[in-house]
Amino acid sequence: MGISANAAICRSPDTPFTIEEVTLDEPRAGELVVRIAACGICHTDMAVRDDHIPIPKPIILGHEGAGTVEQVGEGVTHVKPGDRVIISFNSCGDCPNCDTDAPTYCYNFGPNNFSGLRADGSHTVHIGEAPVQANFFGQSSFATRALAHERNVVKVPTSAADIPLEQLAPLGCGLMTGAGAVLRSMAVRKGMPIAVFGTGAVGLGAIMAAKIAGADPIIAVDVHDARLELARERGATHVFNAKGDPIAKIAELCPQGLAYAFDTTGLKSVIEDAFGLVAPKGILGLVGASPPTDMLALNESALMGGGKRVIGILGGDSNIQGFLEELIEHHVAGRFPYEGLIRVFPFDEINEAFHAGESGEVVKPVLKMPE
Ligand SMILES: NC(=O)c1ccc[n+]([C@@H]2O[C@H](COP(=O)([O-])OP(=O)(O)OC[C@H]3O[C@@H](n4cnc5c(N)ncnc54)[C@H](O)[C@@H]3O)[C@@H](O)[C@H]2O)c1
Ligand SMILES: [Zn+2]
Ligand SMILES: [Zn+2]
């Protein structure tokens, strides 16, 4: 039978998204159908479109969905039809890292998020008779409906009952990753210096969280002055344009080094320069998507002698059920003021929305689906 929806289909890096009618599977055990109200656009959607993260096409992207539960499959009990939910990354729930509350490092992260299929290899969506890759981050929310999973939907708390879903959707990836990197992965300490390289949604999420954590100074680096201004408004104490030798300026400002350096650019040269600034026992956290051929060159004795750590970070080590609520609480209290970073586009303007995100004009484009 199936459930009909309209979804944005990505066919190649060079063709625009087209909105087409698709059929979703009926929800299986542990799955649910969400009527999508809005979905944020994250740089990772672009990375898949451009084949930097290789998944076969055609594919339905979108991994910052929010909406209302329409139908639940067997065994789904923490949400029910009518509940407002945010959708995030999926995880298996049954591996050494899921077992220890580290689902962003699920041993089965790939099959559950990046295969375009269910973890068991089956398709979730068809166009006519033809299968299309979906289940991206366990959702594929560039669509009017998405098939999600028990483990990747979070019920919107009553404290956020008045916040529209287009404002809650982008919490599910970029903002959560930046905030989680600071509050969870690196556990930034009060009074310690941090520099954030790249102030897109992830970097700005990190800066707002660094202010919550009481880091000092909070240094932001980007190539766009407009983004640096946004960083300053949200907590950066110092901002440096990447074109004006930020490394020398940071070294002068923090002669003992940075306790935390956080890279969101994914650029090898930026990461290697940032490593040179890290203080003894400092942490360099990496989240940016880089070309698969890039190899870092780091000095071994500087790494060992200083007891430094270079860590990869996925999803900000967020255990979404608790962490998204925590972020919403910060937001409601005015400590996580991301609303001004969003621009809402109607779903059928998805190509314009991507362009606005890529040109740097908009930090967080969000698609709003028709009612
Ligand atoms: N690891 C994860 O869990 C995770 C989650 C979300 C996003 N990501 C990745 O994180 C990265 C950031 O995502 P985003 O949505 O914030 O992207 P974005 O493109 O909005 O932000 C990147 C920023 O880096 C800036 N930049 C470019 N060159 C620079 C340079 N030389 N020095 C300093 N800044 C520079 C850009 O101007 C931009 O503002 C992307 O690669 C994305 O795929 C990773
Ligand atoms: Zn797992
Ligand atoms: Zn993302």
Image (cartoon, grey):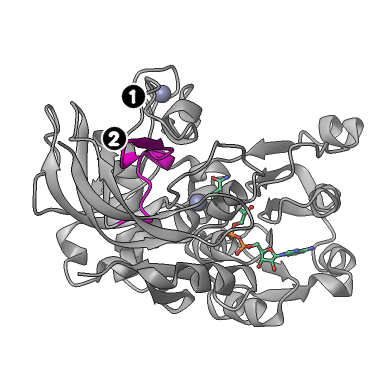
Find out if the beta carbon at label 1 lies less than 8 Å from the nearest ligand 2 atom. yes
Residue 211 is situated, as x and y percent measured from the top left of the image, at 52, 66
Image quarter of residue 102: top left
Examine the structure image and report whether residue 133 is included in the region drawn in magenta: yes
Which residue is rendered at x = 47% and y = 63% of the image?
212
Who is closer to the viewer here, 227 or 52? 52
What amino acid is labelled 1 in the image? Gly
How crowded is the residue under tag 1: few (<14 C-alpha within 10 Å), some, or many (20+)?
some
Residue 195 falls left or right of residue 172: right
Secondary element at tag 1: loop
| 263 lies above or below 245 | above
**Residue that carries the numbered disc 1 in the rendered image:** 93
Mark 2–mark 1 contact, CB under 8 Å?
yes
Residue 140 is situated, as x and y percent measured from the top left of the image, at 38, 47
Q: Distance between the Cα atoms at labels 2 and 1?
A: 8 Å
What amino acid is labelled 2 in the image? Arg
The reply to whether residue 189 is visible in this rendering is no
